[in-house]
Image (tube, coloured by chain):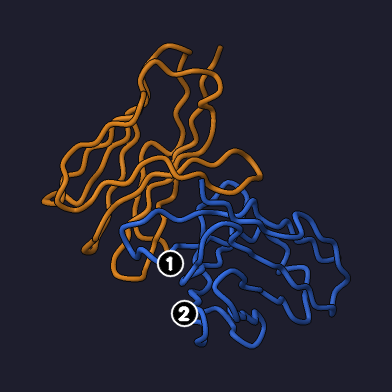
Amino acid sequence: GAVVSQHPSRVICKSGTSVKIECRSLDFQATTMFWYRQFPKQSLMLMATSNEGSKATYEQGVEKDKFLINHASLTLSTLTVTSAHPEDSSFYICSARGTTGTNSPLHFGNGTRLTVT
Amino acid sequence: SQQGEEDPQALSIQEGENATMNCSYKTSINNLQWYRQNSGRGLVHLILIRSNEREKHSGRLRVTLDTSKKSSSLLITASRAADTASYFCATAFNNDMRFGAGTRLTVKP
């Protein structure tokens, strides 16, 4: 089956530093990748949608200068949390969709637990 | 933002019983999908039902879709302790995917 690798799985950083999270589709080409944030015992909140080779589309209320998304290739998207603060601590999950479009399922990474101290 | 509402928010049953979870949504869809999430992990796709389908089966899973009522249900038959997880519905329309609030299912051995 389709595999999405997300790295790192856990990261602890100091306030003010930046953290980069990678999301790779290992055995398929992902034209679209999604980035979500999830608070404990809550649903996934869509942060942004990125299409390969174009700028990400951010959801209302998500600061694009703080959460930098790059989707430079069909197999890699990155999310960089810039100048992280404790309130950015959360579980971040990426997902990817293959080239078959909307009627294909999303394949998820295993998430990144970010803790900002 | 979230799309759908799921109920119940939490469900606790005994092993062997059936579990039914419901999902309601508000907008147009191309398809509706159900996912499972174990604690602290990513989501795993379970089943996809297209907007022109009414029912779909996959193993012990049965999904229904009523587009007139904008609702879907997921039935897990003969539940097992290993089915304990959170279950989310997700609606897909064009390039957009939105998740419901989820149902936390606990299956007691």
Q: Is residue A110 left or right of residue B87?
A: right
* Mark 2 residue crowding within 10 angstroms, few (<14) / some (14–19) / many (20+): few
* Mark 1 residue crowding within 10 angstroms, few (<14) / some (14–19) / many (20+): some
Task: Identify the residue shown where x is 43% and y is 67%.
Answer: B1
Three-letter amino acid code of the residue under disc 2: Gln
Chain painted orange? B
Where does residue A28 sit, x and y in percent of width and height? 52, 60
The residue lying furthest to the left in this view is B68
Where does residue B50 sit, x and y in percent of width and height? 23, 51
Chain ID at mark 2:
A
Residue B93, placed above or below residue B103: below
Instruction: Give the number of the disc on residue A60.
Output: 2
Instruction: Give the number of the disc on residue B1.
Output: 1
Q: Residue B64: which quarter of the image?
A: top left
Rounded to the nearest angstrom, the CA distance separating label 1 from label 2 is 8 Å
Q: In which quadrant is the C terminus of chain B drawn?
A: top right
Task: Identify the residue shown where x is 48% and y is 74%.
Answer: A49
Three-letter amino acid code of the residue under disc 1: Ser
Q: Residue B39: which quarter of the image?
A: top right
Task: Identify the residue shown where x is 44% and y is 18%.
Answer: B79
Q: Chain A takes which shade in the image? A: blue
Labels 1 & 2 near each other (Cβ < 8 A) = yes
Where does residue A39 sit, x and y in percent of width and height? 61, 55
Residue A77, placed above or below residue B29: below
Whether labels 1 and 2 belong to a single chain: the reply is no
Kindly state the secondary structure of the residue where label 1 is placed: loop
Task: Identify the residue shown where x is 54% and y is 34%.
Answer: B85
